[in-house]
Amino acid sequence: MRKKVFIANWKMNYDFHETTFFIRNLLKIVFERKINHNKEIILAPSFPFLHISNQILQGTNLNIAAQNIHHKDKGSYTGEVSAYMLKSIGVKNVILGHSERREFFFEENNVLSEKIKIALKYDLNIIFCVGESFYERSNDQQFHIVKHQLKETVFQCSSDKIKSFYIAYEPIWAIGTGKTATFEQAQTMHKFIRNLFLEKYGESISNKISILYGGSLNDINAKDFFYQKDIDGGLIGNSSLKLEKFLKIVQS
Ligand code: PEP
């Protein structure tokens, strides 16, 4: 049985004090209420706070993720952060392909493919986001779009690398908008994605790969999603910034 995975994407929110305060309180409650049993919790704070966050989480089974990496190893790329650097401070996970990176930083599948290679080189697990725009869904192109996004990126990897991936289906029109996909729409897409893994890599990998939903998940709607056969948890933005809301989602 696949473990449920919950990833808090804090984006460009929270300073040092807010980040550390949140994590310390989260840890306290998680252990008091024993809510991490058979669940994986990953927090994605901003770059400057990854190291301290990792130190606070030492000895627990909660983990951190970076929100991005540069696609090169090192060099003259002012302002960028590499997988090599993150590895040196104990980061084990990175979010790639988020629609905000695709939209505001023009990251296309070819660059994402390079980022995947460098992440794998430094043994980072990859939370890889896919999803269609509102226009694409209105034109019934969602399956084609998601298949294409995977084909040009994740599916370039050999089967022994797939264990390093989580896939996050995030319909762009549902991110930060308060509009969620229905759980039926999400389940249909998740099943479609699992079938693509089946066709490409076979049954064992397709049964094991975790496919998370993201897009305006909250403490009220989360359980409808997590009941679905092919939805293995969530990538959570806004609702992960409120401790009690995030905990309720994890407990859904
Ligand atoms: C996200 O940014 O990955 C996300 C799912 O955000 P939100 O939960 O706010 O829609």
Image (cartoon, helix red, strand yellow):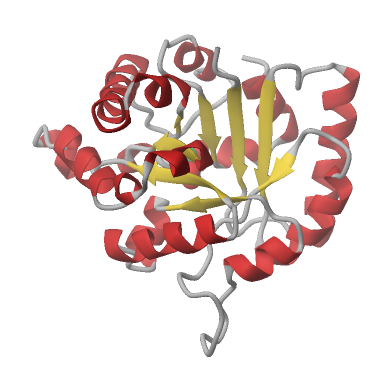
Q: Is residue 15 visible?
A: no
Q: In the image, what residue occupies the spot 75% across and 17% down?
A: 37
Residues 221 and 95: in front is: 95
- Seen in the image, is 147 located left or right of residue 120? left
Q: Quadrant of the N terminus?
A: top right
- Seen in the image, is 207 located left or right of residue 39? left
Number of marks present in the image shown: 0
Image x and y of residue 36, in percent: 76, 22
Image x and y of residue 233, in percent: 53, 25
The residue furthest bottom is 76
- Seen in the image, is 56 located left or right of residue 176? right
Image x and y of residue 244, in percent: 73, 28
Q: In the image, what residue occupies the spot 35% across and 19% down?
A: 203
Quadrant of the rendered structure where residue 102 is? Answer: bottom left
Residues 249 and 84: in front is: 84
Residues 217 and 65: in front is: 65
Q: In the image, what residue occupies the spot 53% across and 90% down?
A: 76
Q: In the image, what residue occupies the spot 55% across and 26% down?
A: 218
